[in-house]
Amino acid sequence: MATKTTFEVGEMLVRILDDGIFVTDAGNLFGGSRKMRIRGAMHAVLVEAPEALVLLDAGFGPELPDALVGRYELRREKSLMGHLREAGYAAEDIAHVILSHLDADHVGWALEPPNFPNATVFVQEDALEEARGMPEGDGRREAVPAVEKGVEEGWCELLSGNGEIVPGIRVEVRSGHSAGHQIVWIESVEDAALYTADLAPAKIWLDPDLISGVDTDPEAARRNRIEVLDAAVSRSATVILYHEPGDFLVNIRSTEKGFQAVPVEG
Ligand SMILES: [Zn+2]
């Protein structure tokens, strides 16, 4: 059965736009020297709301950033932009882009060069502030000049906390993976979907005790992960897992050990 890539939340249509697969050493994600190779997908989300087209995160962009060449490999047949066209839209149609945080695998098509000429790009101020303090060559730091340019030119808007972007699309700051890391709730009166970004980017992260070497504040990440997944359970939300190659649309169930993903049937 083909994996489902669209679903409805009230009047909104949610569409998953694939930006390919990256392959890297596990050590790059979990810290340490693990030699195992792991794969991660990039599933940006297009929300067709009555008021506007909203994109949640923006993949790796046209190519791997220089800093990751050699450590990451990018495999794709069709990019996010190709999938957007296939969905019947042009880059000009996107009104808002919400960036969960400033890692290269989330900001690619949105920042450099900005590929959505009519869009406002939303970034949390704390995420920018943290990125400014990162060492030279760090992926988040690399995004800083583009975000600052966007603020200056008016196409990037800095947020300071939770808020509604358009009716039914609400950002919530859940730090840990980065400072100012934001997740997105897509809500109608009866229904809810949750974009967890890198708070819980794949099924393995449903184990709250898994510690990531790439979380800026692992304890905050753990606490926020549990709180947010609890909310997803109680709201029966469809959860979108950005980096999950297989079952990227799931419902969450509580278990004795934490949480379990139940794939949404296509
Ligand atoms: Zn990521």
Image (cartoon, rainbow, N blue to C red):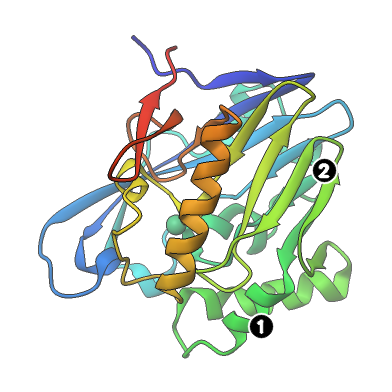
Of residues 159 and 107, the one nearer the viewer is: 159
Give residue 230's position: percent from left, percent from top.
51, 43
Side of 48 relative to 20 (left or right): right
Q: Is 221 placed above or below 229 here?
A: below
Residue at the (55%, 49%) spot, across then down: 228
Side of 212 relative to 198 (left or right): left
Give residue 26's position: percent from left, percent from top.
20, 61
> Would residue 172 be visible to someone looking at this image?
yes
Residue 95 circle label: 2
Residue at the (76%, 57%) spot, across then down: 121
Q: Residues within 10 Å of mark 1 (few under 14, many from 20)?
A: some
Q: Amino acid at mark 2?
A: Ala
User: Regarding ligand 1, which quadrant of the image does it lie in?
Assistant: bottom left
Q: CA distance from mark 1 to mark 2?
A: 25 Å
Q: Residues within 10 Å of mark 2 (few under 14, many from 20)?
A: some
Residue 236 lies in quadrant: top right
Q: Is 246 placed above or below 131 here?
A: above
Give the mark, 1 or 2, whose residue is nearer the N terminus: 2
Residue 219 circle label: none
Residue 111 lies in quadrant: bottom right
Give residue 170's position: percent from left, percent from top.
76, 46
Of residues 114 and 121, the one nearer the viewer is: 121
Residue at the (61%, 57%) spot, across then down: 100
Residue at which label 1 appears:
129
Q: Residue furthest left?
A: 35
Q: Amino acid at mark 1?
A: Glu
Q: In what quadrant of the picture does the C terminus appear?
A: top left
